[in-house]
Image (cartoon, helix red, strand yellow):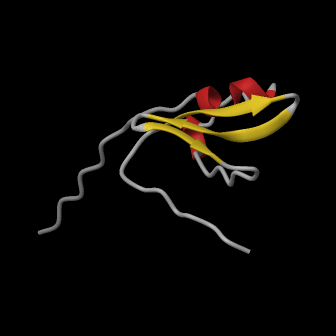
Amino acid sequence: MNFRLETGSEALRIVTEGGRVAGVETSRGRIAAPDVVAVPGAWAGRPLEPLGLAFGLTPYRIQVSIFRS
C-alpha cells in the first residue's frame, strides 16, 4: 500500500467524481487520490460538504490564560 501525507496546506474540499472520492482540493491545488483520510475535527463542515455529510458542528475559537503565583 502506498500513501502520501500532505502538510502545510489547507484542505478545502473532498473531490468526488461519479459518486466516489477522487481526491482533495487544497490551497495549493488538487491532489488526486482514490482514498482520503479526513481528520478535520470541528472544522469538518466545509471539506465534507460535497459528500453530503452534515455533523452540525460549529467551531469556536477561544483563548485560555493560566496564571500561577
Number of marks in the rendered image: 0
Would you say 29 lies left or right of 19 here?
left
Quarter of the image with the N terminus is bottom right
Query: Residue at 60% of width from left, 26% of height from top?
Result: 46
Query: Residue at 62% of width from left, 36% of height from top?
Result: 44
Query: Residue at 87% of width from left, 28% of height from top?
Result: 18
The vertical placement of 3 against 54, above or below, is below
Q: Position of residue 2 (x, y in %)?
A: 67, 71
Q: Position of residue 49 (x, y in %)?
A: 70, 25
Would you say 17 lies left or right of 28 here?
right
> Which of the two residues, 33 or 67, is positioned nearer the viewer here?
33
Would you say 42 lies left or right of 14 here?
left
Q: Position of residue 24 (x, y in %)?
A: 60, 40
Q: Residue furthest bottom?
A: 1
> Which of the two residues, 6 or 39, is positioned nearer the viewer here?
6
The vertical placement of 34 against 1, above or below, is above
- Is any atom of residue 54 visible in this view? no
> Which of the two residues, 55 or 39, is positioned nearer the viewer here?
39
- Is any atom of residue 36 visible in this view? yes
Quarter of the image with the C terminus is bottom left
Q: Position of residue 9 (x, y in %)?
A: 39, 44
The vertical placement of 1 against 45, above or below, is below
Query: Residue at 81% of width from left, 25% of height from top?
Result: 52
